[in-house]
Image (tube, rainbow, N blue to C red):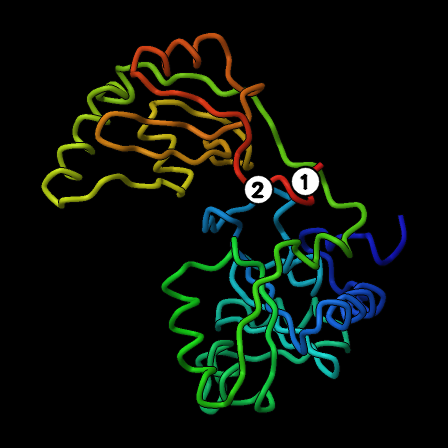
Amino acid sequence: MSEQDKPGEPGARTVNTSERLNALRLLLKENQVDAYVVVSEDQHSSEYLAACDARRAFISGFDGSAGCAVISASGAFLFTDGRYFLQAEQQLDSNWTLMKQGLPGVPTWQEFLAKKLPEGTKIGIDPTLISVSDATSLKKTLTPRNSSLVPIAANLVDKVWTSRPPRPANPIHPLPLKYSGASATEKLNMLRAKLARAGATGVVVSLLDEVAWLVGMRGSDIDYNPVFFAYAVVAPNTATLFVNSSQLTSEAQANLNEAGLQSEGGEGRGKGDR
């Protein structure tokens, strides 16, 4: 395994990130952007990640649970809070500037994009890893400086990370009613009642713990978290679970059928996952 491919292991002091940063900067040129944002979260806004989603840890070498990386042609910046200053100082190599959020005069990564990068900067980001509200807010702060947020469908870190671990696809099991407290049918009925009161035609459930709660099932796709990769879409008369169907045990499929939940293959990302 080359130094470029080697992820930072928990507790490791420093990873040489020169190769991976150079490779990423070539991709910035190919995609005609001046900077790239690497957030900590996965496409479900999870705090705890599967190894394949630890992109910020891979590109920077810093594996604390909170932080954001911004890479430009001339610099690499890691933003984190006071809980992780010491760890980041130990793990970041000389390619990186540690931005100690919360200290006087230190901007957040959002403020940095809007105020510290040159005017007219095109900033790339994976659109599946940022919420609509956050993207909208960020665009408003960038517009006065003629800078822009550029969605790039294929995650650029994934392209650099040639030994990226495969996405977990562990078995999904139903949770016994004595532990869940209510069946999936009852929970769907409660959710639909709230949709009706709100005058809404449907809802997309993307947080993994909320999906697991709603359908009354558990998995192990993220270490130490009883969740599985999936999205749920609930409408007044239909409910669909978007999930890797090969993970569903026969009991899990029966649980979905009983609740009137349809399952569609594919968890919704696909690109770059092996």
Q: Label 2 belongs to which residue?
A: 269
Front residue of 165 and 142? 142
For the point 82% across and 65% down, the residue is: 23
Q: Is residue 224 left or right of residue 123?
A: left
Q: Secondary structure at mark 1?
A: loop
Tell me where residue 131 appears, x and y as whole percent.
42, 58
| Residue 134 found in image quarter | bottom left
Position of residue 264 relative to residue 250, above or below, is below
- Which amino acid type is marked by label 1? Asp
Q: Is residue 1 left or right of residue 244?
A: right
Position of residue 182 relative to residue 69, above or below, is above
Front residue of 108 and 80? 108
Front residue of 92 and 95? 95
Q: Label 1 belongs to which residue?
A: 273
For the point 40% across and 60% down, the residue is: 132
Evaluate if marks 2 and 1 touch, with contact meaning CB atoms under 8 Å apart. yes
The quadrant of the rendering that contains the C terminus is: top right
Q: Is residue 89 left or right of residue 223?
A: right
| Residue 179 found in image quarter | top left
Q: Secondary structure at mark 2?
A: loop
Position of residue 144 relative to residue 122, above or below, is below
Tell me where residue 100 appears, x and y as whole percent.
53, 79
Tell me where residue 14 appears, x and y as whole percent.
76, 65
For the point 44% across and 9% down, the residue is: 251
